[in-house]
Image: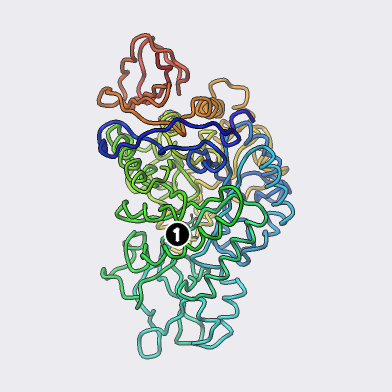
Amino acid sequence: MFRRKFLATTLATAVALSLSSLYGSAYAADATTVQSDENWARNSVIYQIYPRSFADGDGNGIGDMSGVISRLPYLDKLGVDALWLSPFYKSPQADAGYDVADYRVVDPMFGSTEEFERLLKEAHARGMKVIVDLVPNHTSDEHAWFQAALKSPPGSPERARYIFRDGRGENGELPPNNWPSVFGKAAWDRVPGEKQWYLHLFDSKQPDLNWDNPEVRAEFEKVLRFWLDRGVDGFRVDVAHGLIKEKGLADLPIEEGRENAGALVGPMWDQDGVHEIYRSWRKVLDQYPGKRIMVAEAWVSPRERLTHYIRSDEMDQAFNFEYLMTKWEAGAFKDIINSSMALTATVGAPTTWVTSNHDTVRAPSRYGLKELGAHALPGNGIGPNTPQPDEALGLRRARALAMLTLALPGSTYIYQGEELGLPEHTTMEGKYRQDPMFLRTKGEEVGRDGCRVPLPWKADAPSFGFGPGDKTWLPQPASYARYAVDRQEGAADSTLNLYRRILELRHDHKLGDGKLQWVDAGKDVLAFDNGDLRVLINMGTQAAALPEGSQVLLSSEALPEAGKLPGNTAVWLKRT
Ligand code: GLC
């Protein structure tokens, strides 16, 4: 389609990078750049497909490849540059596919390898790149390697692919250390009848691999090649900060583990040794034509450490989760935008912008809450027994946020349904929930099911048009009828049409490659120029004045009073 910037090969203007102005004004997205295919990862809008909830072709209630293929025209029309597919590999689905039993096989639940290849071909024909999810920290317990490990004795090469240790206590009845699982309870399970335990930082069905073992490294390079040979444009690397554990597996300093479970620091996270792995992967990717990319899912602290993952000989991007966690306050957004750009500039990488994904509360629901609290953190869902968001306020803010986020230079992620303004299913009863986080904590943690509900395509059809029948693997709330694609299609002011227009203008005005220049505005208003556009977002509740003679190209809400920008509203103006 017309907007595919990476199909163009025009020479972009050279822009100077001014680090001295860290908290001042000018930031460049890039140093001298050639706007070409090579550059696609620096400015692309990447759409996350969570296959089990996107579109169901065969009617079993779970989304699949044929569902995705049938909706490629929709994605093309939306105007995204690339797709990222969450795992679709053979898996018992203990963690919705993030527990892989075979890295080279498409789970029959989602389709076949041939169907994936068709998807890839058709997406490419439409000018969309496709990246896939790689899950290297752990396999499924049903992976052939883990099954072989269980059948082999302690000390065997089969066990050496994972992290098996003798338990503590007289008979090995206590776990080898006090590490908690991110999903609740201990990070160790005992092998029945033995002294040995195995480590799983996530679910019991997700044993951690031993990345000190060269065999593991060799195998994953082969997995990379397997998908690169099929033509994928890159990988989203799951738990990129977890692969290497500190030698000795020492206890966590804090005795009680649970509140430490989601901690970003500790002997299991962000060890320097992980970078050698990504440097070796870079070499593999660079052997393929075109630009194949890697994006790190790495929850690290302090944030400066995130830049290590995106040095020029490692990955291309890292998700900017701090942006996702920002509270609704102009000053807070300005700070995070400034610091994000300054940090990535230190290694010459593009900044990414993320407002939602399959692990966190959807933005309209997050920003509809009185207090954001812990709900910005992954897994801290909203349930029937927690305070409910103000749906209208949240949607209004999310629409404004889209206009802020997609006006920033760099690469932006859109999570499926975000373009519909879809809220979280916040009242889903426990009996439907399937997230291991909910199950392992016995509901103490609401978990992530609320953001994973199958998408509504048709307001008046069974399953809201998710599939041909009425089956959906998670229940959809009645309110999803209002958000259905067909309802939004013809409504000029719908969120879907807003996103389409945003993406079109973003492309035409080259905002992804642009340069941000702050402009003074009131306390609750953020204002900046990017190329020939001026962007304003009013995060307060009182209307603010628009510059005189403003030529409004797009606004997130109707502007009832001339010359005024209402609260929780954003505009793009044509600079004169
Ligand atoms: C990542 C995924 C999440 C998954 C976890 C374990 O954080 O985004 O969904 O549960 O890794 O693989």
Which corner quadrant holds the N terminus?
Answer: top right
Furthest toward the bottom, the residue is 170
Image height check: is 105 above or below 386? below
Position in image of residue 329 (x %, y %)? 30, 33
Residue that appears at 30% across and 70% down: 252
Q: Quadrant of residue 481?
A: top right
Position in image of residue 125 (x %, y %)? 69, 39
Residue that appears at 62% across and 74% down: 144
Position in image of residue 468 (x %, y %)? 73, 42
The answer to which of 374 and 334 lies nearer the viewer is 334
Report how many numbered discs are placed on residues in the image: 1
Image height check: is 242 above or below 37? below
Instruction: For mark 1, give the secondary structure.
Output: loop
**Residue beneath label 1, please?**
240
Task: State left or right for residue 184 relative to residue 64.
Answer: left
Asked whether residue 495 appears in the rendered view, the answer is no
Image height check: is 15 above or below 449? above
Which corner quadrant holds the C terminus?
Answer: top left
Pointer 1: residues within 10 angstroms few (<14), some, or many (20+)?
Answer: many
Asked whether residue 487 appears in the rendered view, the answer is yes
Image height check: is 2 above or below 209? above
The answer to which of 375 and 294 lies nearer the viewer is 294
Q: Quadrant of residue 224?
A: bottom right
Position in image of residue 130 (x %, y %)? 61, 47
Residue that appears at 32% across and 18% down: 543
**What's the image's color scheme?**
rainbow
Task: State left or right for residue 525 relative to residue 484.
Answer: left
Mark 1 lies within 8 Å of ligand 1 (Cβ measured): no
Q: Quadrant of residue 272?
A: bottom left
The three-letter amino acid code for the residue at tag 1 is Ala
